[in-house]
Structures are given as C-alpha cells and as structure tokens.
Image: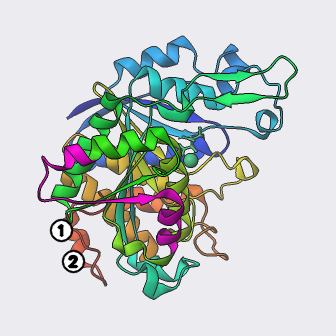
Amino acid sequence: MKLNIAILGGDGIGPEVIAQAVKCLQAVEDNFGHDFTFTEGLIGAAAIDAKGNPIPKETLELCKTSDAILFGAIGTPEYDNDPEAKMRPEDGLLFLRKELDLFANIRPIKIFPALVTNSPIKKEVIAGTDLVIYRELTSGIYFGEKSLSADGKVATDLCKYTEAEISRVAHMAFKAAKKRNGKLTLVDKAHVLETSRLWRKVVTNIAESYPEVELTCMYIDNASMQMSLNPSAFDVILADNMFGDILSAQCNVLIGSSGLLPSASIGTENAMFEPIHGSYPEAKGKDTANPVASILSAALLLNHFGLTEEFNAVVAAVYKSFRKKIVTMDVMGSTKYGTESVGDFIAENIVDVDDNLNINDENIGLGKSTII
Ligand code: IPM
Ligand code: MG
C-alpha cells in the first residue's frame, strides 16, 4: 500500500518519540512490502518560533493532502506560564482538529499482561481491563465562544453541542461496542448541564438502533471513581470533549505510565494518530521518553488502513519489549534503555506475527482485537 504520512513531531519529547514510530513504520514498509512517504511539518511552539503561527499554512496544506498524520506532542513551559500569551502552541493542535473535522478521538486502554504490577492500582482490580474511550474532539467547551472582560476579572467559555455533533460520534461508539462486548457507557453531568441532557437524549434515541448494545449513563464524577475501583467493568465509553480528555488521562494511571497509550483522531476525510501523553519538556533531548505510545499510535494508523497483520506485528513487537524488559525508565525505574534503543528493539522485532507468536512465553491475546 502507498501512503503519504505527515509527520508533526511538535514540542518537547514529541519529535524524538515520533522518530521511533517512523522507524517502526519503515520496518513495516520493508517487511510487508509497502511504500510509505514521510513528510515533516512544523506545529506548536516550534512553529511559532519559526513562522509566527502554531499551525503555518504549509503544515495545514500538508495535513490536508496526506493520507494520515502522525502527531507527537504540543506545549512548552514558556507559554504555560504566560497567561498573556497572544498565541499558544496548543492552538495549533486544536485548529488542526477543527479544520480537518477530526471529530472522534479513539483511545484504547488495555492492561499489558507483562506490566500489570506497574499500576498503582491493585492487580486484582485492574486485571482484565480492556476499554476504549470515544471522545468527541471538535466541539464543546474547547471550541465555544470565549470572553474576558476588559478589566480581566471575568472570563467565560461556552459549552455548546448540536444533535448532529453528538450523533456522529455516538454512532461510531455504538458500532465499536457492537463489535466488542456490547456495553456502552455514556459519561456526562446530566443532573447539572444542559449539554449533557442533550447528549443523553440523543444517545438514548440512537441506542434503539443498536439493540445488541446495552447503554448505561454515568455521571463523570462517578465514572472517574469507577475507573479506579472497577475499570474492567467498562467496555466502550462515550464522552464529550472535556470529560473524555480528563477520563482518558486517568487511564494513564491504570496502565502505570503516561508513556504507553495511543489514540486515533478520525474525521470524514482525514485521520491523525497521536499519543495521549503531553510534551514532557523536562525530558526533551535526554533519550529517556517512552516511545511506546507513539509506536502504538503508528500501529493504529496501520489498522485504520486495514493493515491488520502489520498492526498485530507492531503490537507483538511492543509486547515483546515489555517481556524482555527493554523499556524506558517510566516503566522500570532502573533501566539501561532509552528512547532510541527501545525504538530500535521494537523496529527490529517487527516481523511476521506468526514467527513472533512461536516464541511467546505468555498469551498476548493476538488474534482477537488487540488494542482496539
Ligand atoms: C489531549 C491533550 C490536548 C487536549 C491538549 C494538549 C490541548 O490534553 O490530547 O488529551 O486537551 O485535547
Ligand atoms: Mg489530555
């Protein structure tokens, strides 16, 4: 398959972790006979510095004309600590999501068998956790009108949703639940927010077209508690932009490291793949950041184009790195492996999945849906 992939490393550790994901995609290209072209673009603080714009028009054009986008991370402390900043690196990412209409952000969270003891949550509580969050990504409070009074003492952010915006992501979530374990949890705050009441109404109506799926509605505060108390009870979670952001960050805790979880942002025409973690500026250039979330995001890219074997091969190589303890320090405090060497190991082990299975010393659950 021929694919043009836009590479947006972004800020902080973004470029170094994305470089490992590219390495893995090149290994897939070589081993499975594909033809991928990678073109880099500027975004975030790096783009503000170079072009005075967090998402320069060349980057936007590159993204629009590519088959897929692989995105690293965004944000730097200089802007975080400056409430007066006229432009923010994050604006680049938000603009890109909106402009490309990447309305569904899919965040699969599955406990990796080899890392089960890494979680701060008890093993018996997290064992078997395998869920996926469908987060609405292009509307809600992130994109509503904002205001700041002239005296700088009053600020507002409007949270607005339309039935159509809710409906399109809800259908995707129901379809996923139908293919998985038939359970969908809508997370909202319907006892307080009008937008949440609209979500409930629309989603409850849609549920009638999916009789195989059992719909539960849960308030965000309760969902957040259940995520720590009984995460394996979730199957598919559907949430608005803000609740989905917070709940998926909480999932990093379940996994025991924020460097492991990937995501896919899907629109009508475009698709972008990005790790859930932030730009971790303290680790920039130190060769300590975990490349796995980016590598698994590249795996989701492959899956998106129907390259299932290739997807499984990347996931199998990642699992192998866990079993062999070839991991970065966020996963195992004392390790001699860094970003590059973990990336190298995973890339070198991307082989035909059947060969890899022969040397598996544990059931890594391939064959059924691996991480989605
Ligand atoms: C995420 C991030 C972004 C978000 C930030 C960087 C704007 O936290 O993708 O989860 O809030 O959507
Ligand atoms: Mg987030």
Residue 208 in sight in this render: yes
- What residue appears at the point 67 percent right and 42 percent down from the top-left corner? 12
Tell me which corner region of the image, top left, top right, bottom left or bottom right, holds residue 16: top right
Residue that mark 1 sits on: 354
Task: Work out whether 3 lies above or below 14.
Answer: above
- What residue appears at the point 55 percent right and 34 percent down from the top-left corner? 141
- Quadrant containing the C terminus is bottom left
Q: Which mark is residue 140?
A: none
Task: Work out whether 355 lies above or below 298.
Answer: below
Magenta residues (range): 204-228
Mark 2 neighbour class, 10 Å CA radius: few under 14, some 14 to 19, many 20 or more: few
Q: Which mark is residue 358?
A: 2
| Left or right placement of residue 305 versus residue 52 in this view | left
Dot 2: what SS? helix
Residue 132 at x, y = what percent? 35, 57
- What residue appears at the point 51 percent right and 73 percent down from the top-left corner? 228
Residue 33 at x, y = what percent? 21, 42
- Quadrant containing the N terminus is top left
Residue 29 in sight in this render: no
Task: Work out whether 281 lies above or below 254.
Answer: above
- What residue appears at the point 79 percent right and 28 percent down from the top-left corner? 154
Q: Amino acid at mark 1?
A: Asp
Tell me which corner region of the image, top left, top right, bottom left or bottom right, holds residue 83: top right
Instruction: Tell whether label 2 touches label 1 (CB within 8 Å).
Output: yes
Residue 150 at x, y = what percent? 83, 16
State yes or no: residue 208 in magenta: yes
Tell me which corner region of the image, top left, top right, bottom left or bottom right, holds residue 44: top right
* Residue lying farthest to the front in this orientation: 191
* Residue lying farthest to the top in this orientation: 57
